[in-house]
Image (cartoon, rainbow, N blue to C red):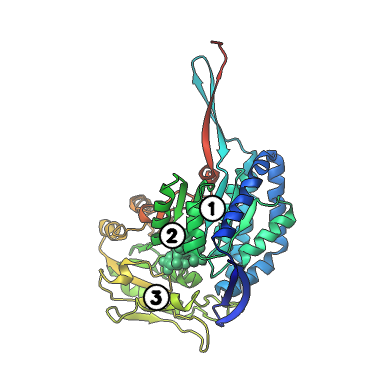
Amino acid sequence: MTDVLEVLEPATERLLQEVPRVGVAEVDAAVARAKAAYPGWRAVAPADRARLLRRVVEAMEGAWEELALLEARNAGKPIASARGEIGMAIETFRYFAGAPERPFGETIPVAGGMAFTVREPLGVVGLITPWNFPLAIACWKMAPALAAGNTVVLKPAELTPLTALRFASLALEAGLPEGVVNVVVGPGRTCGQRLVEHPDVAKIAFTGSTAVGVSIAAGAAATIKRVTLELGGKSANVVFADADVEAAARAAPGAVFDNAGQDCCARSRILVERSAVDEFLSHLEGAVRAIRVGDPLDAATEMGPLISAAQRDSVASFVDGDAEVAIRGSVPDGPGFWFPPTVLWPVPLDHRAVVDEIFGPVAVIVPFDGEADAIRIANDTIYGLSGSVWTRDGAKGLRVARALESGNLSINSNSSVRVTTPFGGFKQSGYGRELGPHATDAYTEVKTIFYNTEGN
Ligand code: NAP
Ligand code: MG
């Protein structure tokens, strides 16, 4: 069954593009194409595979502005951010283009011969991705998967399928063989689910909500599929009184309101040492009010709308009157799924806004008393994706970063993701790591080979 998906522009609520929406039969056909292409792709000599991936880099560079505009309009993100994200997607392919030529295995001394390991590709890999960083997250998965010799079937989120579709055509133009990259646009509960169940899919790499991650892990168990999961977060931004409190406060909005808060790394719990709360809030207020919310295509815009009416309503439900609104930014009049940058304080510690992932521009302030208290509160969550520690005491910064149960920490900075460093979660933020020097490991199987040199 093929019908039509209406892809919207969240800043205007208008139709952006119609694309064919597929069902389970087309997922099966895409898996069959990927399976047919796999032996040829895996047999491509390492240097040739690297060369083809570098051609993908060039094709993406040629389409950079086009991809950025598509992403900005479809995901409602500021054009400046969209350009940066497409740049990161390109960097990801550039980084992993070298992977086919890097050594993988080990030799191990054994009696009677030689034992060594090789890394084999898995086969067909299913990629299921969200709408918040559509092409960047897809490339974090595609680049290492393809570099390691797998073929892929990508199911982007229905809300934002346009850059993935354009990528598929660019990859073909760049010379990747037919069937190596396949994109299926359809609902998660049917098409995504089919990828999870399909016997010819060897692995699922997923980014999205923890609830869907649970269903994917459970579904994948039936065929012992390999699974990596990048899920939600409720990260802490821990500001000690001995920090440069003004710098921490001025940086805090970027750490939670970038991408309108629709970021799994959002530092949405701002933990401030009690004696510094007033100073922190005084600087934070100016920084939040200065955020330019508006037309994603205006180069000066810093924050766009939320992705959908449903997401806006879900975010709004967290601001329920049981917590005080200490700071609220402004939004444009007229159509668009807008929500103002909002800081809640004071707020009860058991309030949903403190406990649950909001995935929108809402932050809470939580005071603490000393190092042990900061660590206890920061770790009091089911999640563990990122976090920051602000202090002028370097040893304390490192101690706290080591103590936080989280995959990505930064000290006196809010940076989370870099192409060259591993990224992923502790606890219910998922398992597996993307990016960085070992990311291809998650798209390979280790094989041990023993060669008998002594005869029988
Ligand atoms: P989601 O439901 O987890 O969607 C992520 C991807 O999974 C989409 O491609 C979706 O397809 C697909 N999917 C949905 N149900 C599936 C199923 N049963 N089997 C296989 N695939 C399935 O996330 P969302 O609904 O877009 O957002 C909901 C919440 O998830 C957010 O509010 C946020 O808390 C969290 N989230 C986290 C991240 C992150 O980066 N960690 C990203 C996005 C969302 P369709 O949407 O096309 O149906
Ligand atoms: Mg969903």
In the rendered image, residue 108, in percent from the top left (x then y), is placed at: 51, 24
Tag 3: amino acid = Ser
Q: Amino acid at mark 2?
A: Asn
Q: From this view, report whether residue 220 is shown above or below residue 326.
A: above
Residue 75 visible within the image: yes
- Residue located 63% across and 44% down the image: 38
The residue positioned 57% from the left and 35% from the top of the image is: 104
C-alpha separation, residue under disc 1 versus residue under disc 3 = 29 Å
The residue that disc 3 covers is 314
Instruction: Between residue 38 and residue 139, name the one nearer to us.
Output: 38
Judge: label 3 CB < 8 Å from ligand 1.
yes
Identity, as a three-letter code, of the amino acid under mark 1:
Gly
Q: Which residue is mark 1?
A: 126
**Element type at marker 3?**
helix
Q: Position of residue 222 (x, y in %)?
A: 42, 47
Pick the quarter of the image with the N terminus.
Answer: bottom right
Left or right: residue 41 versus residue 430 is right
Q: Please, what secondary structure does the residue beneath circle 1 have? A: strand
Q: Quadrant of residue 74?
A: bottom right
Asked whether the residues under the numbered discs 1 and 3 touch, taking CB atoms below 8 Å apart as contact, a structural biologist would say: no
When asked about the image quadrant of residue 248, the answer is: bottom left
Mark before the other along the chain sequence, 1 or 3: 1
CB at disc 1 and ligand 1 closer than 8 Å: no
Q: Position of residue 133 (x, y in %)?
A: 54, 64
Cα distance in 3D space between marks 3 and 2: 32 Å
Give the mark nearer the N terminus: 2 vs 1.
Answer: 1
Mark 3 residue crowding within 10 angstroms, few (<14) / some (14–19) / many (20+): some
The residue at 60%/80% (across/down) is: 15
Badge number at residue 412: 2
Using the image, tell me which numbered label, if any, was put on residue 47: none
Say whether residue 276 is visible. Answer: no
